[in-house]
Amino acid sequence: MDEKKTYQIGMTVYGQVTGLKPYGAFVQFEDGYSGLIHISELSNGFVKNIGHFMNIGDYVLCKVIDIDYDHRQLRLSYKALKRNRRDRFDRVPFLGVPENKIGFRTLAEKMPEWLKK
C-alpha cells in the first residue's frame, strides 16, 4: 500500500498525546507519524490551559486537517470532532413578532399612560 495514501485530509485518527506546550499538543501514532493539535484546534472557545482538555499519555481522537508526507507529520483538529454547544442556539428559527404586540414606542408617546398608572 502506498504510504502517501495511509492518511487523508478529513479522516479520523487515534493517537497518544506525547507532549504539551503552550501552543498545542503533540500526538504520536503507531506507524511513526506524529501530529500537532494547535491550541486553536482544541476548542471554539478560549483555551487557557491545554491540560484542561488532555494530558500526556491520553489517547485522543482527532481529525486530519493537513499532511506533510515528507516529514511524516500531521496537522490535527480536536474541536472538529466535538459538538459545538452554540449550535443549539444558532439554529433556532426566527418566528417573527407576534401580532397584537405594541412594539417599541418613544418615551414621550408612552409617558402620559405611565403617569396615569
Image: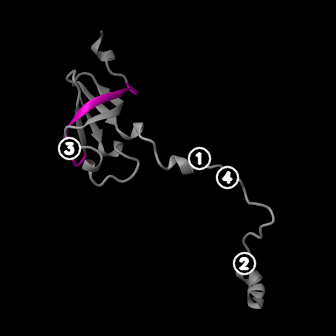
Q: Which residue is mark 1?
A: 91
Instruction: Compare marks 4 and 2 and give the one earlier in the sequence.
Output: 4
Q: Amino acid at mark 4?
A: Phe
Disc 1 on helix, strand or loop?
loop
Magenta residues span 9-23
Q: Residue 77 is drawn in which quadrant?
A: top left
Residue 66 position within the rendered picture, expressed as x and y whole percent measured from the top left: 34, 30
Residue 44 position within the rendered picture, expressed as x and y whole percent measured from the top left: 41, 48
Instruction: Compare marks 2 and 3 and give the one earlier in the sequence.
Output: 3
Residue 52 position within the rendered picture, expressed as x and y whole percent measured from the top left: 28, 50
Q: Which residue is mark 3?
A: 20
> Gap in Å between the C-alphas at discs 3 and 1?
35 Å
Main SS of residues in magenta: strand
Quarter the N terminus occupies: top left
Instruction: Compare marks 3 and 1 and give the one earlier in the sequence.
Output: 3
Which residue is at the front of the view, 43 or 54? 54
Q: Amino acid at mark 1?
A: Arg
Determine whether, in the image, residue 31 is placed left or right of residue 12.
left
Residues at badges 2 and 1 in contact (C-beta under 8 Å)?
no
Residue 14 highlighted magenta (yes or no)? yes
> Gap in Å between the C-alphas at discs 2 and 1?
32 Å
Q: Which residue is mark 2?
A: 106
> Gap in Å between the C-alphas at discs 4 and 2?
25 Å
Mark 1 burial class by Cα count in 10 Å: few <14, some 14-19, many 20+:
few
